[in-house]
């Protein structure tokens, strides 16, 4: 696995991808007003890679960081260079 960085405070241009299951995201919505958030569940992310801009900076989010780290690695392997895991400070 390539080095996947962790980000606690996103930059304004970062897009956060919430990879949690829709039920989980609905129960505990991620609210981060300064950034655009895309809900893209882990089970559909691979099918939607063609819809994502490879030049864009993405931060992947899940509650424990495991799924987000796995999918950040997958994005890197598919040519996305600006990928990290989002772990907000609470």
Image: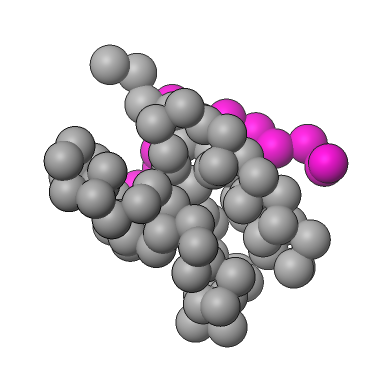
Measuring 70% from the left and 37% from the top, which residue is drawn there? 4
Residue 65: x %, y % from top left = 52, 31
Query: Does residue 16 appear anywhere in the picture?
Result: no
Magenta-drawn stretch contains 12: yes
- Viewer-side residue, 6 vs 24: 24
Horizontal arrangement in the rendering, residue 77 relative to residue 17 (left or right): right
Image quadrant of residue 38?
bottom left
Total residue callouts: 0
Quadrant housing the C terminus: top left
Q: Looking at the rendering, which quadrant does residue 62 occupy?
A: top left
Q: Where is residue 11 in the image (x, y as percent from the top left)?
A: 41, 42
Taking the spot 36% from the left edge, 26% from the top edge, the residue there is 88
Please give left or right for residue 28 compared with residue 85 in the image: left
Q: Is residue 32 above or below residue 50?
A: above
Whether residue 3 appears in magenta in the rendering, the answer is yes
In this view of the protein, which residue sits in the foreground, 58 or 25? Answer: 25
Judged left or right of residue 22, residue 54 is right
Res. 3 visible in picture: yes
Region rendered in magenta: 1-13
Percent from the top left, x then y, of residue 21?
A: 36, 52
Vertical order, 57 against 6 (above or below): below
Query: Residue shown at 17%/48% (left/top)?
Result: 26
């Amino acid at each position: 696995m390539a080095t996947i960085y962790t980000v606690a405070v996103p930059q304004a241009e970062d897009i956060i991808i919430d990879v949690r299951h829709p039920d989980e995201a609905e129960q505990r919505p991620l609210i981060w007003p300064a950034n655009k958030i895309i809900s893209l569940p882990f089970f559909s992310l691979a099918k939607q890679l063609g819809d994502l801009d490879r030049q864009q900076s993405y931060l992947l989010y899940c509650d424990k960081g495991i799924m987000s780290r796995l999918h950040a690695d997958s994005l890197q392997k598919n040519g996305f260079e600006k990928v990290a895991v989002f772990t907000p400070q609470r």
